[in-house]
Image (tube, rainbow, N blue to C red):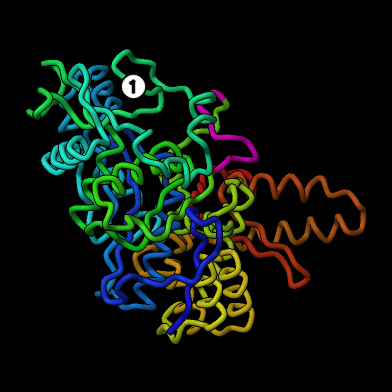
């Protein structure tokens, strides 16, 4: 059997993955709060853990792997959005949940085995909170219930922070009902105009952190294999999950392996609305960027490193995928290449896997290329169709650019070549020039109207 190694955030080491039960692997990944479209940074953990899901299914069998990714459908951000728009919360969460599923499917993500919604597990959350109070790990105060951080000696182990340092540097809510500034909310009161549930502490709603602990315990028990998410969740969300779960179920180990992906930048800068480089997955799709291209750009960087989305990477990925789809058209997948599998099994080294796929393409091993690309969710039938070239005759423009290039080689004046190339690229055409000649390939965003007057 293929040996899988994963970097465990909890131990800060890359370890051989040893499932608790090889016939019942369980992976839980923190999902979205559904109040708006998913931005491209939100897609990174989806793609990362989709690759891991595919790998586990390949190695252990699809029927032996369960993958849960939750939807937070009760949250102050959702309540604020409802107040701002005058829309019903249920309408907002239903709509944005479907948006999320559609957009993630568009980048090739398989649907998880389980997709629990927080509002369906409030009873389990109340039961867990009651248990924590009984065990002395939580306390009720002024309609709130808070977890007592001091009651859990290992608090801070995941993030590597001491409680004293966290208190000194944290931006935490200072409230008179807190015994310790680091204590976090498990339950909070709801006014009549916001959603709420009856509880032993009055009408209210759960805090964010208790959701995943209650849902994972209900679905997977007190011990499961892998817990994942973006590294922005490492503290405080995952740290708090560990504390409340281990205190509620001291007989279990909660998650054996913790995995966190790094964040995403755009053209070397942090994504920000103020910088004008903030966009959603749907924005890219609507601009004509194929979901498969988005996926390949993401896979080009190891999940543990910061990723930079650039237009150059997008163009290179699109060109590569066009070539690969042309090579594998009508081909039946063969066996997954051993080197590709080894790369993916080595802590999801997708960049290494892509390098090997390029070698297979260069060797024209179409059967192995197709099977191996499928392993990481590329060249699948579901993501196909975007590469179909528009029915347009570009031979005249190819001839014109060939002649302009030949003339430029004589005169050393490449201004006309540059002008033609810029116009072609602006029209959504990939320009390929080599010793063999000139080839023009219409892209997904091809606009024939922009070629008028160019030929």
Mark yes or no: residue 155 visible: yes
Q: Is residue 191 above or below residue 321?
A: above
In percent of width and height, residue 76 lies at 27, 25
The residue most toward the top is 176
Q: In the picture, residue 433 is in which quadrant?
A: bottom right
Residue extent of the magenta highlight: 264-274
Q: Callout 1: helix, strand or loop? A: loop
Badge count: 1
| Residue depicted at x 73% and y 68% | 437
- Mark yes or no: residue 286 visible: no
Residue at 46%, 81% (x, y): give it: 2
Q: Residue at x 65, y 64 (%)?
A: 439
Estimate the x, y position of residue 375 in percent, counting from the top left.
Answer: 43, 72
Q: Is residue 272 magenta?
A: yes
Residue 422 placed where, x, y %? 68, 45
Q: Which quadrant is home to the N terminus?
A: bottom left
* Residue lying at the far right of the rendered structure: 411
- Relative horizontal placement of residue 367, taking residue 426 as reference (left or right): left
Which residue does the numbered mark 1 point to in the structure image?
Answer: 179
Where is residue 138? Give x, y as percent.
Answer: 25, 32
In front of the other: 300 or 21: 21
User: Which of 347/126 is in front?
Assistant: 126
Looking at the picture, tell me which residue is in the foreground, 242 or 399: 242
Q: Is residue 30 above or below residue 20?
A: above
């Amino acid at each position: 059997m293929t040996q899988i190694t994963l970097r465990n955030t909890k131990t800060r080491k890359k370890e051989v993955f040893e499932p608790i039960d090889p016939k019942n692997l369980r992976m839980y990944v923190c999902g979205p709060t559904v109040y708006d479209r998913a931005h491209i940074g939100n897609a990174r953990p989806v793609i990362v853990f989709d690759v891991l899901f595919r790998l586990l299914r390949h190695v252990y069998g699809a029927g032996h792997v369960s993958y849960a990714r939750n939807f937070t459908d009760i949250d102050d951000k959702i309540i604020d959005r409802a107040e701002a728009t005058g829309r019903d919360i249920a309408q907002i969460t239903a709509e944005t949940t479907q948006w999320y599923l559609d957009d993630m499917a568009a980048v090739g993500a398989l649907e998880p085995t389980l997709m629990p919604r927080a509002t369906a597990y409030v009873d389990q959350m109340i039961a867990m909170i009651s248990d924590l109070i009984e065990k002395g790990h939580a306390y009720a105060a002024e309609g709130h219930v808070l977890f007592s951080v001091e009651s859990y000696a290992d608090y801070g182990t995941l993030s590597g922070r001491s409680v004293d340092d966290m208190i000194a540097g944290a931006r935490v809510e200072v409230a008179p009902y807190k015994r310790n500034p680091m204590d976090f909310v498990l339950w909070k009161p709801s006014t009549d105009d916001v959603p709420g549930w009856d509880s032993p502490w009055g009408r209210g709603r759960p805090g964010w952190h208790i959701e995943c602990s209650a849902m994972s315990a209900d679905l997977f028990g007190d011990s499961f294999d892998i817990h994942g998410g973006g590294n922005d969740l490492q503290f405080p969300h995952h740290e708090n999950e560990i504390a409340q779960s281990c205190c509620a179920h001291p007989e279990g180990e909660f998650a054996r392996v913790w995995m966190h992906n790094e964040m995403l930048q755009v053209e070397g800068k942090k994504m920000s609305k103020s910088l004008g480089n903030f966009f959603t997955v749907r924005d890219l799709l609507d601009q004509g960027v194929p979901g498969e291209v988005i996926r390949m750009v993401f896979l080009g960087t190891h999940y543990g490193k910061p990723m930079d989305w650039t237009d150059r990477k997008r163009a290179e990925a699109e060109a590569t995928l066009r070539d690969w789809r042309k090579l594998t058209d009508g081909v039946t997948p063969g066996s997954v290449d051993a080197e590709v599998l080894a790369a993916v099994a080595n802590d999801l080294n997708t960049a290494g896997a892509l390098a090997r796929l390029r070698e297979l393409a260069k060797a024209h091993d179409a059967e192995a290329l197709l099977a191996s690309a499928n392993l990481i969710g590329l060249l699948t039938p579901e993501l196909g169709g975007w590469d179909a070239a528009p029915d347009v005759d570009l031979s005249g423009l190819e001839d014109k650019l060939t002649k302009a290039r030949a003339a430029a080689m004589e005169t050393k004046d490449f201004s006309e070549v540059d002008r033609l190339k810029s116009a072609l690229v602006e029209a959504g055409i990939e320009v390929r020039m080599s010793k063999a000649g000139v080839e023009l390939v219409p892209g997904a965003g091809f606009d024939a109207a922009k070629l008028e007057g160019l030929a």
